Amino acid sequence: MGYWLMKSEPAVFGIDDLATRPGRTEPWDGVRNYQARNMLRDQMRPGDQAFFYHSNCAEPGIVGLMEVATPARPDPSAFDPQAQYFDPKSDPDAPRWYLVDVRYLRHLARTITLAELKTHADGPLADLPLLRRGNRLSIMPVTLAQWRFILALE
């Protein structure tokens, strides 16, 4: 099983939105960074677990858990001229962008803030991509040790 951290802006799509979707499942669309796309397409598998991270808000942090529900598939929003994430260079015969469906598991008992995570940047979370300077990826891997440590903060 793999472990991930996936960011979303709560004003656009937050953990509460995922929790209220039919089947508590939703496509994780709109990934438009090649490195994040490669991880999503080539490494994520159904059953992998992910932290749901609220970004670009008053208190960024990990707010819940979800799981990858489906294998990666082409992101249809890339082909739709009316879609927010339309990419005129993406071709259905050679897709550029992918998505997975994610399924809500639970809210955390409390938000584990970015500020709190940073207090462990010289210890157990030293290699957590979220804490690397300049890292703005919306999807990033988490090791099993990091996963367990972060859950223990809850």
Image (spheres, rainbow, N blue to C red):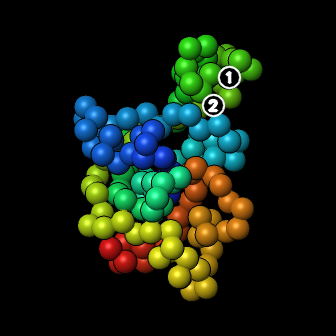
Q: Amino acid at mark 1?
A: Asp
Secondary structure beneath dot 1 equals: loop
| Residue 97 screen position, x and y as percent | 63, 31
Query: Does residue 21 appear to the left or right of 44 in the view shown?
Result: left
Measured along the vertical axis of the image, is residue 63 above or below residue 71?
below
Q: Between residue 113 and residue 151, name the one nearer to us.
A: 113
Q: Quadrant of the C terminus?
A: bottom left
Residue for point 43% across, 33% down: 27
Q: Quadrant of residue 101?
A: top left
Residue 131 or 95: which is nearer the viewer? 131
Furthest toward the bottom, the residue is 123
Left/right of residue 78 with respect to residue 142 in the rendered view: right
Residue 38 location, x and y as percent? 65, 44
Q: Residue at x 37, y 72 (%)?
A: 151
At x 42%, y 73%, the residue is: 150
Residue 148 appears in the figure: no
Instruction: Check disc 2 and report the residue beneath it.
Output: 97
Q: Nearer the viewer, mark 1 or mark 2?
A: 1
Return the residue nearer the eye: 75 or 133: 133
Vertical side of 49 occupied by 149: above or below: below
Q: Position of residue 145 (x, y in %)?
A: 48, 75
Residue 122 in view in this figure: yes
- Residue lying farthest top? 81
User: Circle 1 is placed at which residue position?
Assistant: 87
**Residue 149 location (% of width, % of height):** 43, 77
Neighbour tally class for label 1: few under 14, some 14-19, many 20 plus, Cα within 10 Å: some
Of the two numbered discs 1 and 2 on the same chain, state the one appearing first in sequence.
Answer: 1
In 3D space, how far apart are the residues under numbered discs 1 and 2 (Cα atoms)?
9 Å
Mark 2: which amino acid? Trp
